[in-house]
Image (spheres, rainbow, N blue to C red):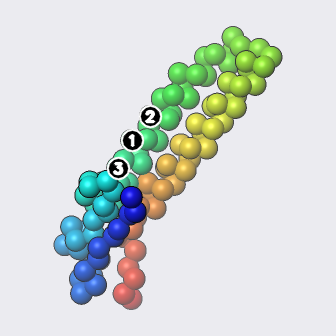
Amino acid sequence: TTNKCSINMNDRLTNHSRQSIKLYKGGIKMTIDELAHEYEQQYRILNAKMDALKPLLCIYSGQDLYLLRKRIRIYYDMACECKRTASMLSGYYEEDFYD
């Protein structure tokens, strides 16, 4: 499925046009703010997973420790990307393109 974005070009990017911008994915309609919220939720989930794995760093050794650090690093990279994307999406309407 492809993502489609419908924008009413006659409107300025205000609260009113927030409702006219919808993302379509698998039949689900979502505003950009809702999508930003989803990324924030994923960020919190990934942080919780990392927090749950951190105590194991004191227990594991050798190959297991290496794999654990690798898994935490992957979660960290994903969390950073989610946070960055959420910030970008939530600030989408704050920029004024019509100066």
Q: Position of residue 21 (x, y in %)?
A: 27, 69
Report the residue marked by disc 1: 41
**Position above or below: 72 against 18:** above
Say left or right for 58 vs 15: right
Q: CA distance from mark 3 to mark 1?
A: 6 Å
| Amino acid on which the number 3 mark rests in the picture | His
Tell me, yes or no, whether the two marked residues, 1 and 2, touch with CB atoms within 8 Å: yes
Instruction: State the quadrant of the N terminus.
Output: bottom left
Q: Secondary structure at mark 3?
A: helix
- At label 1, counting other C-alpha atoms closer than 10 Å, the crowd grade (few under 14, some 14-19, many 20 or more) is some
Q: Nearer the viewer, residue 62 or 23?
A: 23
- At label 3, counting other C-alpha atoms closer than 10 Å, the crowd grade (few under 14, some 14-19, many 20 or more) is some
Residue 6, image quadrant: bottom left
Q: CA distance from mark 3 to mark 2?
A: 12 Å
Q: For residue 1, say whether it is visible.
A: yes
**Position above or below: 45 against 82:** above
Instruction: Indicate which disc residue 98 carries.
Output: none
**Position above or below: 65 against 7:** above
- At label 2, counting other C-alpha atoms closer than 10 Å, the crowd grade (few under 14, some 14-19, many 20 or more) is some
Tell me, yes or no, whether the two marked residues, 3 and 1, touch with CB atoms within 8 Å: yes
Instruction: Tell me which residue sits at (61%, 17%) in the image.
Output: 55
Residue 78, image quadrant: top right
| Amino acid on which the number 2 mark rests in the picture | Ile
| Amino acid on which the number 1 mark rests in the picture | Gln
Q: Position of residue 36 (x, y in %)?
A: 37, 54
Instruction: Tell me which residue sits at (40%, 74%) in the image.
Output: 95
Q: Nearer the viewer, residue 97 or 24?
A: 24
Instruction: State the quadrant of the C terminus.
Output: bottom left
Q: CA distance from mark 1 to mark 2?
A: 6 Å
Residue 34, image quadrant: bottom left
Report the residue marked by disc 2: 45
